[in-house]
Amino acid sequence: MNFDLAIKTVNTLLKKEQPKTFSSSWIFDRTQIVYHFVRSNFRTENDHIDWDRFTYALKPEYSRRRMRKRKKKP
């Protein structure tokens, strides 16, 4: 797996399924190979998965559909 193939795979899935929104869980459910690639290779300085860096490379119409983490209510 490489970056170009991961982006192409997610773009293809998003085009095929046309979800209103998607998240990391959506990617995990549909293509675990891409999820594990991102988990292993895209990390922040705090050692969290850097989904922003990955989704920035998606087609613009798909990257806008990404649902970020929900904030927990206190």
Image (tube, rainbow, N blue to C red):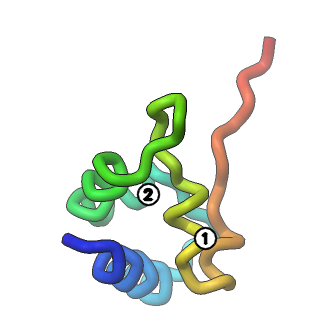
Q: Is residue 8 above or below residue 43?
A: below
Determine which of the numbered discs, if any, sits on residue 74 in the image: none
- Name the residue at 27% across, 57% down: 37
Asked where in the image residue 3 lies, by quadrant, the reply is: bottom left
| Front in this rendered view, residue 43 or 14 | 43
- Name the residue at 64% across, 40% down: 69
The quarter in which the N terminus is drawn is: bottom left
Asked where in the image residue 67 lies, by quadrant, the reply is: bottom right
Q: Nearer the viewer, mark 2 or mark 1?
A: 1
Rate crowding at label 1 as few (under 14), some (14 to 19) or many (20 or more) other CA atoms within 10 Å: some
The answer to which of marks 2 and 1 sits earlier in the sequence is 2
- Name the residue at 66% across, 69% down: 65
For numbered disc 2, what is the local secondary structure? helix
Q: Residue 60: horizontal and vertical position, in percent?
A: 67, 83
Kindly give the residue lying farthest to the front in the view shown: 45
Q: Residue 36: horizontal and vertical position, in percent?
A: 26, 52
Could you tell me the amino acid type at mark 1? Tyr
Q: Is residue 28 above or below residue 14?
A: above
25 left or right, relative to 70: left
62 left or right, relative to 71: left
Could you tell me the amino acid type at mark 2? Trp
Q: Rounded to the nearest whole Å, what is the CA distance between mark 2 and mark 1?
A: 17 Å
Q: Is residue 59 above or below residue 46?
A: below
Determine which of the numbered discs, if any, sits on residue 26 in the image: 2
Q: Is residue 34 above or below residue 10?
A: above
7 left or right, relative to 66: left
- Residue at numbered disc 1: 56
